[in-house]
Amino acid sequence: MHWLGLAELLLLALVADGLFRRLGVPGLIGMLLVGVGLGASGLDALDPKLLAMSGDLRQMALIVILLRVGFGLNLQTLRSVGRRVLLLAWIPASCEGLTITIVAQPLLGLSPLEAGLLGSVIAAVSPAVVVPLMLRLIEEQRGTRKAIPQMVMAAASLDDIAVIVVNGILLGLLVERSSAVTGHVLGLPVGLALGAIVGALLGWMVLKAFQRFQPNPNRQVLFILALALLLLRLQDQINGLVPFTGLVAAIAIGVTILELSEETAHVMARKLASIWVFAELLLFVLVGAQLNLDVALESGLAGFGVLGIGLAARSAATWACLGGSQLTAGEKLFVTAAYIPKATVQAAIGAVPLMTLQAAGMSTRPGDVILAVAVLSILITAPLGAWLSGWLAARVLTPELAELAPQDAGG
């Protein structure tokens, strides 16, 4: 019997979120477990209309994530932390994704393309876990003399962009089952560049329109959100003709507005944070509801092994990227730990392969396996990474004033 609608779902998710936060565990774990308990593998109590809307809701949540990344991606900060951000943005995720692609084939029985898709789902860092901690450290001025929180936040944002773009390409190849890999790869830089240019131009035009007509902030953020969703639809419609990455365009809108008007960008970022509270609740509950527990239990140990090997590869690559820097061993360990949590991106794209395979009339087992391992990654790494990075931050990142105190005393 399906008896739970949107109101009951939100209430249960909010209660679970609050309870888990009081236990010192990220609230998103509670939301996820609510979804598992209410979904087809549990009580099967959710209204089917909600599940039918899950694709659109997940797409909206992904756009909110990307817009928040854009409004927080300060180009001056990127320049101040230099090339190391680019290394941290690409190399750890690439190493983790490639490692998972290799080991998931024998351990989970996936094809090379399906294993690659799993790697692209798992390789992203969670902005919902990482960004709040980095902002708190910046407020406390811990590690800010070496711009450590800024570096981690910027690198994590670029990491997410890269992983989501690659995931979209692999998803298209999974359904097409074509030999057009070369065309997709060659079109990638063109699509990224075109997306950035279109997004920057739209950001400039939108800001000029806002300054002239002065709509209230609520209308501004809703307009930006709708525009970003249209860009995502445009990507799907014209990609056969022109390579275009709507995800990058959405981020470029936020970056451009931030560069041209910080005040406007900060107001819109706060509004998006409020929208994210609603989007996050639905995102994690609905992802949990779509989990096939039988497949999850079947791939449990193997999935755990895939995650562990992938994280080991990511951590080794992160440490290597910090080689030759001025960071101490403790600070390098903190950055490595901060790169562990996975949650929002996995929830946003983890169920997409399953839904895509269902729509294409293909076997859904690979999609079930990918979703199961994505959920497992959230349950394991979100609390572990949040706790470990917070614990290390308090012990290895010295407040800026404390770092300068001995020099002042000696002067």
Image (cartoon, rainbow, N blue to C red):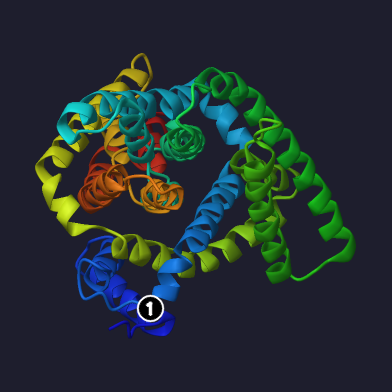
**Residue name at image x 33 percent, y 76 percent:** 46
Specify the quadrant of the image occupied by residue 314: top left
User: Relative to 75, does residue 211 appear above or below in the rendering?
Assistant: below
Residue 288 percent coordinates (x, y): 29, 62
Quarter of the picture holding the N terminus: bottom left
* Residue at 85% across, 57% down: 209
| Quarter where residue 45 is shown | bottom left
Establish if 283 lies above or below 74.
below
Secondary structure category for the residue under label 1: loop
Outermost residue on the front side: it is 361
Image coordinates for residue 245, horizontal then vertical, percent: 62, 37
Task: Please tell me which residue is depicted at 68% across the width and 36% down the height of the picture.
Answer: 195
**Disc 1 designates what residue?**
47
Q: Is residue 97 visible?
A: yes
Label 1 sits on what residue type? Asp
Q: Residue at x 29, y 27 (%)?
A: 101
Toward the viewer: 278 or 257?
Answer: 278
Q: Position of residue 30 (x, y in %)?
A: 26, 67
